[in-house]
Amino acid sequence: MPNFTLTARGPFSLAASTRFLEGFTPAAFTGTAAQPLDLAFPVEGSWSTVGVRVRPDERGVTCEVVSPPAPGPDLLAAVRVQVGRILSLDVDGSQFPAVGERDEMVGGLQRRYPGLRPVGFWSPYEAAAWAVIGQRIQIRQAAAIKARLASQLGELVSFGDHALPAFPAPQRLAALKTFPGLSGRKPEWLRSVAQAALDGRLDAAYLRAQPRDQALAELRQLPGIGDFSAELILLRGAGDSDAIPRAEPRLARAVGLAYGLPEPPSGEQLTSISGFFIRQLGCLFS
């Protein structure tokens, strides 16, 4: 089976990534940190469904494509890029420890979660679909609907001793009329998300190549996508590593508590706080 290695530049722990997924409700992850990380997802561009088994390696991770059994070079290259982005191995984190040396709060988090990097959605398309599914309902209810979409409309990928359903490729959601649990205009919005993915408007490389404000503005043009969802798609879907969510009130409250601020910081203040370290280091991720 085709293998490839992704090298970590800076601290990284696959076990820390897996432990994060154990508590990340949208992922519906059922494995443990002691096992290989098995991923099933549609590959951006071709939207062929693949299965990838990820194991720790002294350099980063080794990835084994278990399905399809003989991927062509273009598909294999696309899988490599996508897995790297999912695990944030596509960015240089070698200067990240210096942030903790300059800021005790960050240093404390680094010691508490050694080697943890952001784990993204499998694609901006899936992040956008999650943003639509989860509107105005509880997160566990949304996760259950997402899991049913995968099991009923997605492809099942075998890993030998078990199988995982992948989230449906956009061509499946583009024809969606109704689905249990999707109320109001959500089926219509999901069709729009799927068509945007098919048109390349949710391509991760395309989104990251745009000026950030322009990328967010384009995402907000999608029906059902507002400020919060646009940031989710760009940061957690496309893996923009040099930005923070300005429309996430929980982050503002957490930063306010961590730094002893009299009230949660505004979006501008959050940007200033995060930008301080970037200015001091020259660049956090280059």
Image: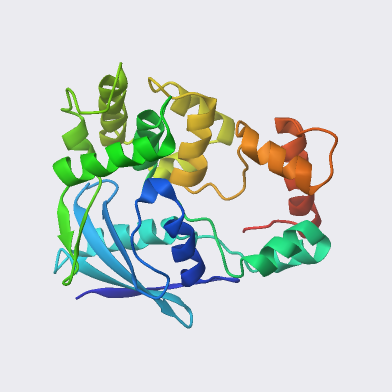
Looking at this rendering, what residue extends furthest in the top direction? 184
- Please state the horizontal and vertical placement of residue 55, each as a whole percent of the image: 37, 75
Is residue 121 visible in this depiction of the protein?
no
Residue 146 or residue 233, whichever sits in front = 146
Provide residue 28's location: percent of width, then percent of height.
34, 51
User: What residue do we see at 57% from left, 50% from top?
Assistant: 241
Q: Quadrant of the C terminus?
A: bottom right
Residue at the farthest bottom position: 58
- Identity of the residue drawn at 74% across and 52% down: 278
Residue 108: x %, y % from top left: 74, 63
At horizontal 27% and vertical 65% (from top left) the residue drawn is 52
Residue at 52% in and 43% down = 235
Q: Is residue 123 above or below residue 92?
A: above
Q: Is residue 269 above or below residue 39?
A: above
**Relative depth, front residue between 28 and 91:** 28
What x and y, as percent, mark residue 281? 76, 59
Q: Which picture quadrant has residue 91?
A: bottom right
Q: Is residue 133 left or right of residue 68?
A: right
Question: In the image, is 85 to the left or to the right of 260?
Answer: left
